[in-house]
Image (cartoon, rainbow, N blue to C red):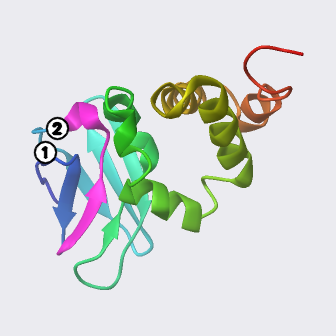
Amino acid sequence: MFTPRADRHSQIIVRTNRYSVPVRLLGKRVRVVLHASQLVVYERHGKAARHERLIAKAGCRLEPGHYLEALIREPGAFLGATALEQAGSADKFTPAHDARWDQARKVHGERDGTRALIEALLLGRRVPHEDLVAGWLPPCGPGP
C-alpha cells in the first residue's frame, strides 16, 4: 500500500511509474493498493481510479477521462494530450469518437467542436457507451 500525493499534472508516482488520477484530487494524498496486474487508487469516499499495472520502470499510464474537467476549459490541449494518444492505442478512443470529433469541428470550429466532444465524453460517464454513440447519429449541427 502507498499514499502518494497527486501532482499538478493530476498524476501519482508509484514505484517509479506515473499514473493519472481525476483532476479533483490535485494536491491530495490518495491510498494506492498495488496488485499483481493492476493498481487501484482510493480517495476518502471510495475508488477513484484503476489502471493496468506497469511493470517496466519510469512508465506512464494516463486515462483521458481523468482530465476532461480540465480540458473543457482548455480544449486546445486535447489534441496533443498524451492521455488521448494512449486511449487511441488501447482502443478507448474509437473511430466513432474520431468521426464525431471531425464532424463537430466542421460544424462548430476547432475550439467549440473539441469542447462539444469533451462534453459528450463527460456525458459518457453517466450514459452507456452504446447509447452515447447511437446519439451521435445523425450528424450534429443544422440539418438539411
Q: Identify the image quadrant of residue 75.
A: top left
Q: Is residue 21 magenta?
A: yes
Disc 2 residue crowd, few under 14, some 14–19, many 20+, Cα 10 Å: some
Assign the N terminus to one quadrant of the image. bottom left
Q: Residue at x 36, y 54 (%)?
A: 40
Q: Position of residue 85 (x, y in %)?
A: 47, 62
Q: Give above or below for 36 relative to 91.
A: below
In screen coordinates, is 71 left or right of 97? left
Residue 126 visible in the current orientation: no
Instruction: Answer left or right for 19 relative to 129.
Output: left
Residue under label 2, please give it.
26
Mark 1 crowdedness (10 Å alpha carbons): few <14, some 14-19, many ≥20: few
Q: Position of residue 121 (x, y in %)?
A: 56, 33
Quadrant of the snapshot with the C terminus: top right
| Residues rendered magenta in the picture | 16-25
Identify the element where label 2 is drawn.
loop
Labelled pair 2, 1 in contact (Cβ < 8 Å): yes
Is residue 18 highlighted in magenta?
A: yes
Whether residue 82 is visible here, answered yes or no, is yes
Foreground residue among 22 and 139: 139
- Residue at point 25%, 31% (across, down): 24
Residue in the picture at 76% in, 35% down: 133
| Amino acid type for the residue under numbered disc 2 | Leu
Judging by the rendered image, the residue that carries numbered circle 1 is 8
Q: Which residue is nearer to you in this view: 94 or 62?
A: 94
Name the outermost residue toward the bottom.
56
